[in-house]
Amino acid sequence: MTGGRFETIVIGDGIAGWAAAAVLARRGQAVALLGRAQGLPPVGEYLPPEGVAALAALGLDGVLRSAGHRPSRGTVSIWGSDAPLRRDVLMQPGGRAFCVDRRALEADLRRMAGEAGAVAQTLSVPPVVTGGAGAWQLDLRGAGRAPLTARFLIDATGRAAWLARALQARVTRCDDLTALALFWSGAPTEDAALRSKSLPDGWCYAAPLSGERLVTVFLTPAAVLPRGAAARRALALERISESRLAGGLCAGARPEGFRAMAAGSQVTEPSCGPGWAAIGDAAMAFDPLASAGMTKALLDIRETVGDRALAPDALAERRRDRFAAYLAELSDVYAAEQRFGGPFWTPRQSS
């Protein structure tokens, strides 16, 4: 890519960005996607029936045929009592859920977007954005790179909300929940249910993937974490081993990677305006307890540039309502766990 004119430029190359690019390119738009080299593995593996339906509504559900994604019958949780509770998706509308391989899903969406004509560029530094609705200009700040122009911009940069911030939007973080993720190999399991369990100082979940791979995540506030990656990894291993649901899956498995990342609730305001919109976590980010991150991103695409696209004012109102409803539901779920108190649980049980 050495410059050019596009109808839409997407900034961010995660699932939200590639899905948006694929949808727009398939509709015949001239689309460019600007991303950064991927580093650590992405986290967020469970796609509930609502997410499967959202993919289908965008015409992208073919990506779920990949061998990297495991059909899941639902979830199993120990929350509020010592008895495991299973929720079977076969009894829910849609009746399909998956534990997905995020890297494989992104690769398939990238392939779909490319086959439809979307062009991509990997950047080492963010572009300089000038202009406005209908006449944006992006300076890629690289030797020999001509500026790009577009009528519409999409921020798919995740929690960083880079474009929205550059356009003077404000990101408000509601809490400092942090995810400590461990990646495993050699963890065979016949049941691909998403497993979760509350713990005295947080909660954890485990998602079995294809190829005897597994992701386990311990979630707790950043304020209580020890310093250094080694100490945080050790804490995650300890908490996962204490979990009846997740710990058993790791027996004999090999830990192959670790990362820590923000996982709390946050909202960007405004998250859209004339000629631009944020989608996915760049618009609002959910606690993983909601299991709704990918679903929300797909709904954002449909309401921003899809068949249910809304005007900026209506889209902003829809998002305010969605975030308020999410916070209310999240509070109810945390309040259902009354066996624990302390700095993690007490604020969440009473919010």
Image: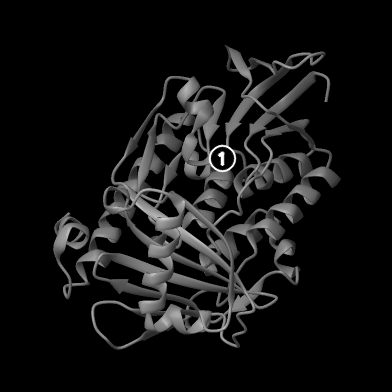
Q: For the point 77% across and 40% down, which residue is it? A: 25
User: Percent x, y for residue 44?
Assistant: 53, 59
Relative horizontal placement of residue 147, taking residue 214 as reference (left or right): right
Near-viewer residue (197 or 39):
39
Q: How many numbered markers are drawn?
A: 1
User: Percent x, y for residue 287?
Assistant: 38, 55
In the displayed structure, would residue 94 be above or below residue 233?
below
Q: How is the image coloured?
A: one colour
Q: Secondary structure at mark 1?
A: loop
User: Percent x, y for residue 230?
Assistant: 45, 56
Pointer 1 local density, CA inside 10 Å: few below 14, some 14–19, many at least 20: some
Q: Point out the image quarter for the C terminus.
A: bottom left
Q: Point out the image quarter for the N terminus.
A: top right
Q: For the point 79% across and 37% down, which residue is it? A: 118
Residue ID for mark 1:
309
* Amino acid type, label 1: Ala
Relative horizontal placement of residue 329, taking residue 139 as reference (left or right): left
User: Percent x, y for residue 258?
Assistant: 53, 58
Near-viewer residue (303 or 268):
268
Q: Quadrant of residue 81?
A: bottom left
